[in-house]
Image: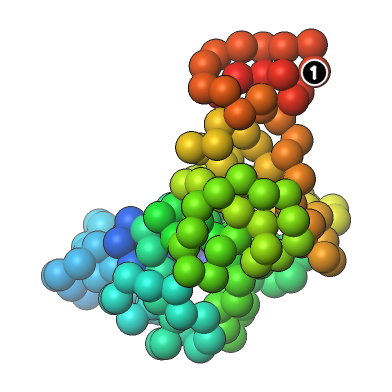
Amino acid sequence: PKASTKGSVTVTDLSSDLAKIDPTTTEKLSGALSKAKVNHPTVVETVGNGTAGFNNGPWYEATFTEPKGLAEDFHARGLVVSCTKGNQIRHIALNGAVTPLAGSLTGEPGFDNFAGTKARFNWPQGVSVAPGDGTIAVADSKNNVVRELARPSFVVRTVAGSGVAGFLNAATPLEARF
């Protein structure tokens, strides 16, 4: 979950939606996690139509494949989300428009340091956005590395990890194991 300064929380449901929950109401909802009650808040916004997929566009047409990592993007005003099974990093603008930043448009996994949708990830999970320049860090879990997307071109580069699974603090970041 990602909390805002206004008290709402954005959550991913690990299937195909993201939801913004308003903690100030007491209306009870039931159903999927995107409509779950958490101390009786109300879901005020949902991004995604409930179907797994790779569609970009307006919030009501967008589809996600296991959205997992979520970070507030002050640089481009919105949210950055990692779609783990979709092997994508995507942006959700304040108006709800969903656009790809990096990774396969069809969910193809891989390990390629290119720009935008030519880059490949393999189960990206955690994401964070640097407050200054908006660089996006990604935990690329099945590749056992940390990658970054540099703005404005979204060129992906590996910044830590050797690609070998394990636990090793190394002399240089690219020799480390995760």
- Is residue 53 at all visible to an observer of this figure? yes
Indicate left or right for 132 with 3 as reference: right
Which quarter of the figure has residue 85? bottom left
Residue 38, placed above or below residue 90: above
Residue 137 location in percent, x, y? 68, 46
**In front of the other: 7 or 85:** 85
Q: Which residue is mark 1?
A: 172
Which residue occupies 73% across, 39% down?
Answer: 158
- What is the secondary structure assignment of the residue under circle 1? loop
Residue 140 location in percent, x, y? 56, 42
- Is residue 79 at all visible to an observer of this figure? no
Which residue occupies 55% across, 78% down?
Answer: 98
Residue 37, placed above or below residue 140: below
**In front of the other: 61 or 39:** 61
Residue 116, placed above or below residue 142: below
Residue 25 location in percent, x, y? 31, 72
Indicate left or right for 14 with 91 as reference: left
Which quarter of the figure has residue 18? bottom left
Which residue occupies 65% across, 37% down?
Answer: 146
Amino acid identity at mark 1: Thr
